Amino acid sequence: EKDVHSKLPLRGKKVLITAGPTYEAIDPVRFIGNHSSGKMGFEVAKTAASLGAEVFLVSGPSSQKVKHSFIQRIDVKSAEEMYNACHKVYKTVDIAILSAAVADYKPKNIATQKIKKKDASLHIELSPTKDILKSLGEIKTNQFLVGFALETNNEVENAKKKIKSKNLDLIVLNSLQDKGAGFAGDTNKITIIDKDFSQQVFELKSKKEVSKDIINEIINRIDA
Ligand code: CTP
Ligand code: CA
C-alpha cells in the first residue's frame, strides 16, 4: 500500500542503475562499441532521485550530464569495469535497473601497440563478456531486479525467457517497431513484463516520461 502522505515514495531506498554503451578495447586507440546514448538510464536515474532515492549511476562512455545531490555517478568504460562497479554496490541496494547496452563480446587479446594496416583481412577474435544482469540475478536476495531487452523478433517471448534466465522481477522491452524508438533518439516505446508475465504496453513517449512509467511500475510492486 502506498504512503499517501509521502511525496517521496523512494525515500530511504538505494538504487543501482546502469546506462550507456560499453567500449571494448582492440588496441590503445580503438574499441568495439555501440550507439547507445545513455539517455534512458540517465532519465531513470533522475526520476528515481527526484522521488527520494539514493542512486548509484554506473555509466559507460556517454555525453549525458547529470547534477543531483542524490545521484552518485560512477564512470566506466568496459563491460568488465561495469561488472565490478555493479558488484561493489549491489549488496547494499534495494532496486537495480540495468539499462546499459553492454557489449556481448570483447576482443580476446588487446594489442599493446596500435595495430598497423596491412594489405590483407584482419581477424579479431572475440570472447564473451560476463552477463552483469545475470550475475546479479544469481546472487539476488531482497533486491528488486529490473532488466531491459532489445529484440527484433519474437519480442515478448524472448523477453519472458530473459526474465526466467536472469531471475528478474521486471523487464522493460524496447520496441524497435515504431519510428522514433530506440538508442539515440529522445523517445521510446516500451512494454513492461513482470515475473508473473503480466504485461503492459505503453505509447511512444519521451524518455523522461518513459522513465516515470518504469519507476511507477517498480514502486507499485515493491509496495505491494
Ligand atoms: N546485460 C548485462 N550484461 C551483459 C549483457 C547484457 O547486464 N554482458 C543486460 C542488459 O543491460 C539488459 C539485459 O541484460 O538489461 C538484456 O540485454 P540484451 O542485450 O537484450 O540481452 P542479452 O542477454 O545480451 O541477449 P541477446 O543480446 O542475445 O538478445
Ligand atoms: Ca546483448
Image (spheres, rainbow, N blue to C red):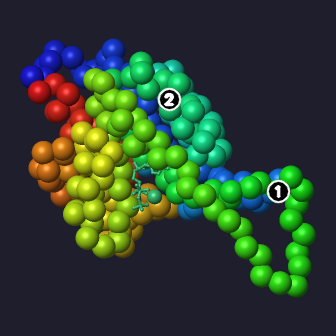
Residues 84 and 67: in front is: 84
Residue at position x 15%, y 18% from top?
3
Mark 2 neighbour density, 10 Å: few (under 14) some (14–19) many (20 or more):
some
Judging by the rendered image, the residue that carries numbered circle 2 is 87
Judging by the rendered image, the residue that carries numbered circle 1 is 111
Q: Quadrant of the N terminus?
A: top left
Q: Position of residue 45 (x, y in %)?
A: 43, 35
Question: Is residue 36 visible in this depiction of the protein?
Answer: no
Compare marks 1 and 2 and give the one earlier in the sequence.
2
Asked if residue 4 lies left or right of residue 79, the reply is left
Q: Quadrant of the C terminus?
A: top left
Residue at position x 56%, y 62% from top?
35
Compared to residue 219, the image places residue 211 above or below, namely below
Give the structural element (helix, strand or loop) at label 1.
loop
Compared to residue 126, the image places residue 38 above or below, namely above
Q: Position of residue 15 (x, y in %)?
A: 39, 27
Q: Position of residue 207 (x, y in %)?
A: 38, 51
Question: Is residue 215 visible in this depiction of the protein?
Answer: yes
Asked if residue 171 lies left or right of residue 82, the reply is left
Residues 183 and 198: in front is: 198
Query: Which numbered dot is residue 144?
Result: none
